[in-house]
Image: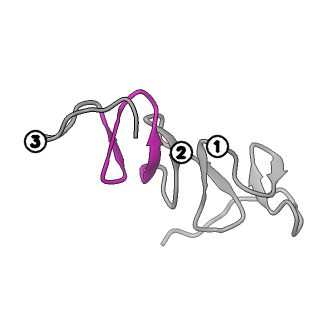
Amino acid sequence: MAIDNMCYRDCNSTHKYSYNQSCYSVCPNGTYITYTSVTCGPCSPICNTCRDTATYCLSCNSSFYFNNTCLTVCPNGYYGSPTL
């Protein structure tokens, strides 16, 4: 694992996650808790929400959700649905 040479904003136990120079009690939509557990990282542009990594999608922006990933087309044998 790479050495983390980042400087973090001094947040507190109530608002412990840092993102864009602000502190949050939970990471804002479109971000996830990074491996440092003190910062929020942006989700991949194709993900609306994500977890653990930028590309582990929980929901998608204008694409299809399949196996924790967002796809522009459904795999063979599957069809797209506008609702869950």
- Nearest-to-viewer mark from 3 and 1: 3
The kind of residue on which mark 2 rests is Thr
Tell me which numbered mark, 3 or 1, is placed earlier along the sequence. 1
**Mark 1 → mark 2, Cα distance in angstroms:** 6 Å
| Highlighted range, magenta | 55-71
Pointer 3 or 2: first along the chain? 2
Residue at horizontal 42 percent and vertical 49 percent from the top: 55
Query: Sequence order check: which comes first, mark 1 or mark 2?
Result: 1
The amino acid type, in three-letter code, at marker 1 is Asn
At label 3, the amino acid type is Gly
**Looking at the picture, does residue 14 appear above or below residue 22?**
below
Q: Are marks 3 and 1 in contact (CB under 8 Å)?
A: no
Q: Which residue is mark 1?
A: 29
Is 40 above or below relative to 59? Answer: below
Q: Which residue in the structure is indicated by mark 2?
A: 49
- From the viewer's perspective, is residue 10 above or below residue 78? below
Q: Quadrant of residue 8?
A: bottom right
Q: Nearer the viewer, residue 37 or 64?
A: 64
Question: Quick check: is 67 in the magenta stretch?
Answer: yes
Question: What residue lies at 69% left-to-right and 53% top-to-bottom?
Answer: 27
Q: List x then y, in percent, for residue 31.
A: 61, 47
Residue 42 image point, x, y percent: 58, 44
